[in-house]
Image (cartoon, grey):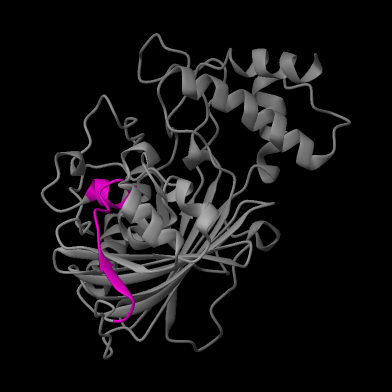
Amino acid sequence: MKGRAVVVTVAMLVASGLSACGERDRGIVADVEAAIAKTERQSRRFLYTEDLGQRNVAVRGAIEDDFRFEAAVQENNLFLLEQVIRDDAIATRLQEPDALGSFASSLAAAPPETVEALKSKKWVVDSIAAPSLLLAGNVQVVTGDDPVYDALTVFNYVRQVLRQQDVRKFDENSLDYRPKEDPFPKPKESSDVDRYDFVPGRLPRSTDLAGGGVNQAVPAMQHFRKMAIYVRNGSVIRVLEDIDVVGRLDDLRRNYDLNIDGTDTDRAVEVAILGINEVRQGQGLDLIRVRKMSFGLKDIGGDVKVDLPEDDVVAGDLSFLKSTTKRRGAKSQAPTASTVPPVETAP
């Protein structure tokens, strides 16, 4: 009953969006956007990791250009899947047969011969189902559905965060800097690396209204998100994110009178997010995922080549995979307002 009471309390929240975020430094925003744009134009290798507590995902890959890229997925150190995209074709190899369902939009739509080939750990090549890395600027990136797509579209996600949160250039001598609240490594002295920090917004209060509307509203990712971007020679070399709910538990208690005193920290976070997400789901908003994300890049601008496999390959229909729903020219590539939660932007 205690957990349910917290859910009901949180369900009475009436404020969402980023408020009092201060004047945005357009010059710094432009610097971050320019670094992303420069990096996207170059070949590169990457390692994407997501720590969800009891579940850890890693995606390692390479990008030759917007039409040639590859990725391999591990979960809790178990190798699951490989994908290679070149021009209009996509090749997929399953390393863990029981994992197929987690990468499929609908297993019922999968051709039996394709399923059999994948579960036999053969490469399956579909000549027309390649997904795209290119997204419209106003499309929201919703993470958690497809780790390959999450890893390949980190920069689109960062652009979304730029619309939601204030960003500042790291300065450990700033009066606003609190070392104990900083989860990210600092650039070394005399380093040629610049760090840019995204600042979590002030949690809305129970007296606030969401955009002047009548809907109840709750805190969003931007109220808990800490993010740092590291740039060297004008290119992004690292992105780190920490959805820090622990650091905002006192604010949650104060703003919403949450009765979670005496509860261990992990349970307090679980109960608070459960209540917040219950309301968000009812309003058709994306859910808050408590995670730590790391995205590291190397060989930027190097000799990165991506080719389709040639050995142990069969042709097949891969249109049932989640990644191929974003295929080039597919109608589902441009999500509609009815299928994608609205982007919550900074004022």
Counting every numbered tag in the picture gives: 0
Looking at the image, which residue sits at the far top? 214
Please report the residue visible at 58 percent of the width from the left and 12 percent of the height from the top.
Answer: 12
Closer to the camera in the image, 76 or 144: 76
Which picture quadrant has residue 93? Answer: bottom left
> In the image, residue 269 lies at what x, y percent?
71, 37
Relative to 327, does residue 274 appear above or below in the rendering? above
Looking at the image, can residue 112 be seen?
A: yes
Which picture quadrant has residue 60? Answer: bottom left
> In the image, residue 235 lies at what x, y percent?
31, 77
Relative to 189, does residue 23 appear above or below in the rendering? above
Q: Quadrant of the C terminus?
A: top left
> In the image, residue 129 lies at what x, y percent?
19, 55
Q: Which residues are magenta?
A: 311-326
Relative to 21, does residue 300 appear above or below in the rendering? below
Closer to the camera in the image, 275 or 173: 275
Looking at the image, which residue sits at the far left? 329
Please report the residue visible at 48 percent of the width from the left and 87 percent of the height from the top.
Answer: 191
Closer to the camera in the image, 100 or 306: 100
